[in-house]
Amino acid sequence: MAGTPDICPALRYEDAKAAIRQLTEGFGFTEHAVYEGEDGRVMHAELTCGNGMVMLGSKGSGTAFDKLMADGGPTAVYVRVDDVDEHHARAVAQGIEIVMPPTDQEYGSRDYTARDAEGNVWSFGTYAPGAAG
């Protein structure tokens, strides 16, 4: 389908609702869909950023995917943004842990790295993987 991402990282969180708040308020993602179970836990959520998407849900939901991911540790996700410093300032204002401030890299990118409340590492920068040049 045109306009939809072909690859979507999928993460599991102890507190998926808090993760959604942190990703939307601190990193500027937009809620596309959130589905909750009868117990109020997030069974599946889709958050967009530019033309990309990340999917997430609550740990302990009992789904087959949840069982496969039960022993998974933190993951890392890279997101291309136009203005690294503005994006970084937003994250700082929301109290997100910054592990590397905005830095100009030897390969021409400017990026920073943060850690979400459950230990996943998020890098935001101007590098566009797969772009010619």
Image (cartoon, rainbow, N blue to C red):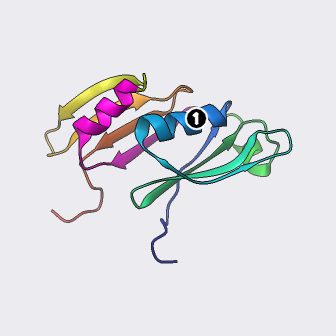
Asked whether, in this view, residue 56 is left or right of residue 115, the answer is: right
User: At 30% across and 33% down in the image, what residue appears?
Assistant: 88
Q: Residue at x 44, y 43 (%)?
A: 77
Disc 1 marks a residue whose amino acid type is Ala
Q: Quadrant of residue 90?
A: top left
Q: Which residue is mark 1?
A: 19
> Viewed as shown, does residue 110 lie left or right of 76?
left
Q: Is residue 115 above or below residue 41?
A: above
- Which residues lie in the magenta part? 73-93
Query: Which image quadrant: the C terminus?
Result: bottom left
In depth, the one of 25 and 121 nearer the eye is 25
Question: Where 93 sits versus 57, above or below?
Answer: above
Q: From the viewer's perspective, tell me whether residue 43 is left or right of residue 17.
A: right
Residue closer to the observer: 124 or 26: 26
Q: Residue at x 20, y 65 (%)?
A: 132
Q: Position of residue 126 (x, y in %)?
A: 24, 48
Residue 37 covered by magenta stretch:
no
